Image: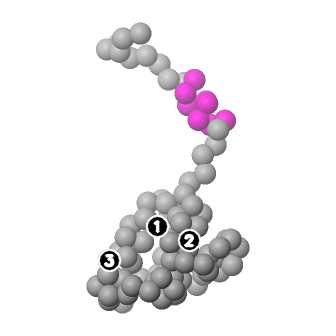
């Protein structure tokens, strides 16, 4: 049985990429080539939580690639510009680094 994607566990971005890779391997093994069927299987196997999220995403029902891209962007961590600036300003030159 192919497990649904758990949206509540930590590291959702990396876990999503791994889960999606496993799904694509399964689709190859099942010889699924039709984009609409691939999209349907993606939404089915991802599980109810992911399917519910899909109703809020634009163009999710167009193609497999559109669904894959929209969900990957959804699960990608959002970067905080303020936090990234803070991290940059906290950097210190190490003794072995040239100026």
Q: Earlier in the sequence, mark 2 or mark 1?
A: 1
Task: State how far apart marks 3 and 1 are (Cα).
Answer: 14 Å
* Few, some or many residues within 10 Å of mark 1 (<14, 14–19, 20+): some
Looking at this rendering, what residue extends furthest in the top direction? Answer: 99
Residue 51, quarter of the rendered image: bottom right
The reply, left or right, for residue 29 in relation to residue 10 is: left
Range shown magenta: 82-89
Q: Earlier in the sequence, mark 3 or mark 2?
A: 3
Task: State how far apart marks 2 and 1 are (Cα).
Answer: 16 Å
Residue at image point 64% right, 43% down: 80
Which residue corresponds to mark 1? 16
Is-magenta flag for residue 62?
A: no
Looking at this rendering, what residue extends furthest in the right direction? Answer: 56
- Relative to 84, is 55 above or below? below
The disc placed on residue 50 is none
Is-magenta flag for residue 86?
A: yes
Residue 99 lies, in percent from the top left, at 41, 10
Residue 41 lies, in percent from the top left, at 47, 86
- Relative to 34, is 97 above or below? above
Q: Is residue 46 visible?
A: no
Is the Cβ of the residue at disc 3 closer than 8 Å to that at disc 2? Answer: no
Which residue corresponds to mark 2? 66
Q: Earlier in the sequence, mark 3 or mark 1?
A: 1
* Few, some or many residues within 10 Å of mark 2 (<14, 14–19, 20+): some
The reply, left or right, for residue 6 in relation to residue 24 is: right
* Few, some or many residues within 10 Å of mark 3 (<14, 14–19, 20+): few
The disc placed on residue 25 is 3
Residue at image point 50% right, 72% down: 65
SS for dot 2: helix
Name the foreground residue: 66 vs 16: 66
SS for dot 3: helix
């Amino acid at each position: 049985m192919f497990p649904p994607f758990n949206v509540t566990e930590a590291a959702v971005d990396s876990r999503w990429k791994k889960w999606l890779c496993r799904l694509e391997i399964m689709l190859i093994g099942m010889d699924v080539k039709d984009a609409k069927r691939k999209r349907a299987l993606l939404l089915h196997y991802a599980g109810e939580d992911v399917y519910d999220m899909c109703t809020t995403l634009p163009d999710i029902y167009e193609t497999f690639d559109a669904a894959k891209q929209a969900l990957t962007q959804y699960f990608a961590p959002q970067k905080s510009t303020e936090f990234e600036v803070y991290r940059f300003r906290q950097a210190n030159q190490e003794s072995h680094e040239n100026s």
